[in-house]
Amino acid sequence: KAGVTQTPRYLIKTRGQQVTLSCSPISGHRSVSWYQQTPGQGLQFLFEYFSETQRNKGNFPGRFSGRQFSNSRSEMNVSTLELGDSALYLCASSWGASGSYEQYFGPGTRLTVT
Amino acid sequence: QKEVEQDPGPLSVPEGAIVSLNCTYSNSAFQYFMWYRQYSRKGPELLMYTYSSGNKEDGRFTAQVDKSSKYISLFIRDSQPSDSATYLCAMSARETSGSRLTFGEGTQLTVNP
């Protein structure tokens, strides 16, 4: 069974630009969560989508948004990029939208904002 | 205070040593406990998933949960150089909170040949 895939793997953007990251979950998984990982803050929860609906949201500004499609694939968008948005963005998929289900991570998209 | 506390290390051990990694937490709503391994520039890999207090064993890995003390541990027996990575504990609450995971900051482990 294929794992979680994320594209692109690396991105370099300039301050003020916007970026869209993509995540394809494991086949059959319906929940996709997004996390930001930085050396200073560690792994922080951004949001979770299940059946095309945002179920849960972390403490990030409105510049961070996402969506999920009917095939469970998900995208996240960051508008008006800031230097502090440089991070590894990870998505995780699970079968259901509950803490009782195991979550599997993709390899991440490394975003550098200059 | 962070909801999940984890000693960041770094931890350096000789090959074959028993490694003990620990996390404490303050939120009694956490019900599900995970350990992830993350190699440099890779995504976290799920190692262990536990629900109830007690021990769970998988090969050289043993996960231990003590809900009364709000303390979880991961033991690695016969450690190998390939175990060198950052180990992250993660926790999630009851179903009404969705799949949201709260992570410790990770412990960097080096196993020396």
Image: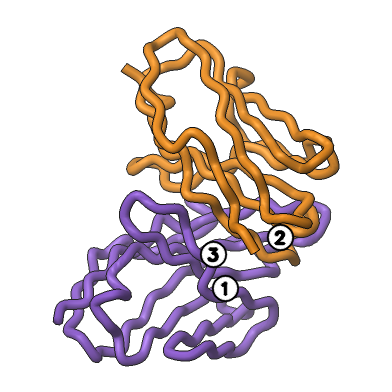
Chain colours: A orange, B purple
Q: Which amino acid does label 2 sit on?
A: Ala
Could you classify mark 2 by the number of other residues whose Cα lies within 10 Å: few (under 14), some (14-19), or many (20 or more)?
many
Give me the C-alpha separation between circle 3 and circle 1.
Answer: 5 Å
Q: Which residue is drawn at 75% across and 34% down?
A: A68
Residue at the far top in the pictured view: A16
**Picture layout, residue A86 above or below residue A105:** above
User: In the rendered image, is residue B54 in sight?
Assistant: yes
The first of marks 3 and 1 along the sequence is 3
Q: Which amino acid does label 3 sit on?
A: Tyr
Q: Position of residue B112 (x, y in %)?
A: 16, 78
- Please give the residue where the numbered disc 3 appears in the rendered image: B25
| Element assignment for label 2 | loop
Residue B70: which disc?
1
Name the quadrant of the C terminus of chain B: bottom left
Residue B78 image offset from top left, x and y in percent: 31, 91
| Discs 1, 2 touching: Cβ within 8 Å | no
Q: Horizontal and vertical percent for residue B108?
A: 29, 63
Q: Name the residue under label 2.
A: B93
Compared with residue B47, is residue B107 higher up or lower down, i.e. above or below? above
Q: Nearer the viewer, mark 1 or mark 2?
A: 2
Label pair 3/1, CB-CB below 8 angstroms: yes
The residue closer to the viewer here, A94 or B23, is A94
Tell me where residue A74 sits by quadrant: top right
**Mark 3 secondary-structure assignment:** strand
- Residue drawn at x 67%, y 65% as measured from the top left: A102
Judge from the rendering whether residue B69 lies leftward or rightward of residue B29; answer left or right.
left
Question: SS for tag 1?
Answer: loop
**Which chain does tag 2 point to?**
B
The answer as to whether the residues below labels 1 and 2 share one chain is yes
Q: Which mark is residue B20?
A: none
Q: What residue type is labelled 1?
A: Lys
Residue B97 seen by the camera: no
